Image (spheres, rainbow, N blue to C red):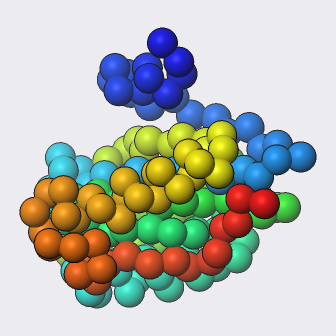
């Protein structure tokens, strides 16, 4: 069983991203709402996330999809990168501060997977963009409005 095969059996995510000096470091990240509560998929929340993610410091967000109870995104470190865990805590905290009047609570942990190849990166992108179709929210990936690309993360 490979490392990626074991992730489906883990009860808690493992963290710690190796940032390679010679290869691209692109992380596929899943962040869930507390108790998988479906509060996230609104135009207002989408706008707030984009405002927070526009920041170029530490990590940059590439492709993403916002679902009702979780989100998927790709992220890449910048030269001044803090740990992925610190960065995720930071933007979740910023989001919560901007939405204090709402019951917006995140799960404490997140799931992250370092992309090992361009092929894996494209496969995860396909999985992510088809997610709204798979759960019956829309009939085609392009019909889902809460998705996009903040910064283009290139494999090469």
Question: Relative to 22, is 52 above or below?
Answer: below
- Residue displayed at 62% across by 77% down: 151
Where residue 76 sits: x, y (%)? 67, 59
**In-front residue for pair 27/47:** 27
Q: Is residue 56 left or right of residue 53?
A: right
Q: Quadrant of the C terminus?
A: bottom right
**In-front residue for pair 34/142:** 142
- Residue displayed at 34% across by 20% down: 9
Q: Report the number of discs.
A: 0
Instruction: Tell me which corner region of the image, top left, top right, bottom left or bottom right, holds residue 42.
Output: bottom left
**In-front residue for pair 33/117:** 117
Q: Is residue 145 left or right of residue 81?
A: left
In this view, which residue lies farthest toward the left? 136
- Residue displayed at 57% across by 69% down: 62
**In-front residue for pair 113/15:** 113
Q: Is residue 105 left or right of residue 6?
A: left
Where residue 129 sits: x, y (%)? 35, 65
Whether residue 105 appears in this view of the structure is no
Question: Relative to 98, is 139 above or below?
Answer: above
Where residue 86 sits: x, y (%)? 60, 51
Where residue 135 sits: x, y (%)? 14, 57
Whether residue 149 appears in this view of the structure is yes
In this view, which residue lies farthest toward the top? 1
Q: Is residue 6 left or right of residue 134?
A: right
- Residue displayed at 53% across by 18% down: 2
């Amino acid at each position: 069983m490979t490392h990626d095969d074991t992730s489906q059996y883990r009860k808690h995510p493992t963290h710690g991203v190796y940032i390679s000096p010679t290869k691209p470091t692109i992380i596929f990240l899943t962040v869930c709402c507390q108790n998988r509560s479906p509060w996230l998929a609104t135009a207002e929340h989408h706008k707030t996330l984009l405002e927070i993610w526009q920041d170029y410091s530490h990590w940059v967000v590439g492709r993403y999809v916002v679902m009702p109870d979780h989100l998927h995104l790709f992220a890449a470190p910048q030269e001044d990168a803090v740990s992925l865990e610190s960065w995720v805590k930071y933007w979740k905290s910023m989001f919560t501060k901007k939405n204090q009047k709402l019951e917006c609570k995140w799960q404490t942990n997140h799931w992250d997977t370092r992309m090992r190849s361009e092929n894996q990166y494209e496969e995860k992108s396909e999985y992510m963009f088809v997610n709204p179709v798979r759960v019956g929210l829309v009939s085609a990936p392009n019909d889902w409005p809460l998705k996009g690309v903040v910064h283009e993360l290139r494999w090469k």
